[in-house]
Amino acid sequence: MNKKMAIIATKGTLDWAYPPFILSSTAAALGYEVEIFFTFYGLKLLEKNLNLQVSPLGNPGMPMPIPVPVIVQILPGVQSFVTSMMKKKIEEKGVAPLEELRQTCLEAEVKFIACQMTVDLFEMDINTFIDEASYAGAVSFFEFASDAEISLYI
């Protein structure tokens, strides 16, 4: 019997995009059968164009080169600045770009499931999603997750 890992991806920001792709590609390389269920804002990770941002606002654990007061974090342009800093750090440290990690997952046969209820709720255009995404409800995901040795909520 194959080992299984189930992930629920709920966030659509640059900093929260890495964990589901890193963990699922690693698990697939270790022989796990992996499914990621993308729901609510996590559906942004299925978009063809991954133009994701990161915000320091409401993210007190984010390491900053200097402390930035919350009042400054709400100013226009801060999110773009922080996003460019994060992308530069990712590149400097040799971390794979998100598009590459996502493609690695697909090549390793990680299944990407878009939550149909969320797609309908937000009236999302599925033409903006990658072709490899499939669509199902929570029941379908639970059928897979109920047999998984590892289940993660990200």
Image (spheres, grey):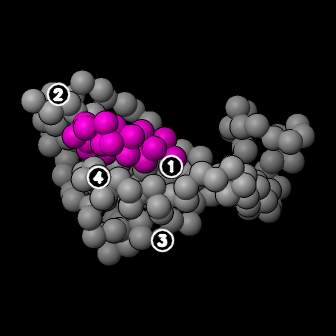
What amino acid is at disc 4? Ala
Q: Would you name the residue on which mark 4 appears?
A: 108
Residue bearing mark 1: 17
Q: Which of marks 2 and 4 is nearer the N terminus?
A: 4
- Label 1 vs 3, first from the N-terminus: 1
Q: Looking at the image, which residue sits at the far top?
A: 149
Assess disc 2: are there few (<14), some (14-19) or many (≥20) residues with their C-alpha within 10 Å of its C-alpha: few
| Amino acid carrying mark 3 in the image | Asn
Q: Give the range drawn in magenta.
A: 18-36
Q: What residue did someone put label 2 on?
A: 146
Res 66 quadrant in image:
top right
Residue at 59% over, 46% down: 15
- Please state which of the two labelled residues, at mark 1 or mark 4, is closer to the viewer: 4
Residue visible at 72% across and 55% down in the picture? 92
Provide the secondary structure element on which disc 2 rests: loop
* Tag 2: amino acid: Ser
Q: Is residue 128 left or right of residue 94?
A: left
In three-dimensional space, the C-alpha distance between marks 2 and 4, rounded to whole angstroms, equals 22 Å
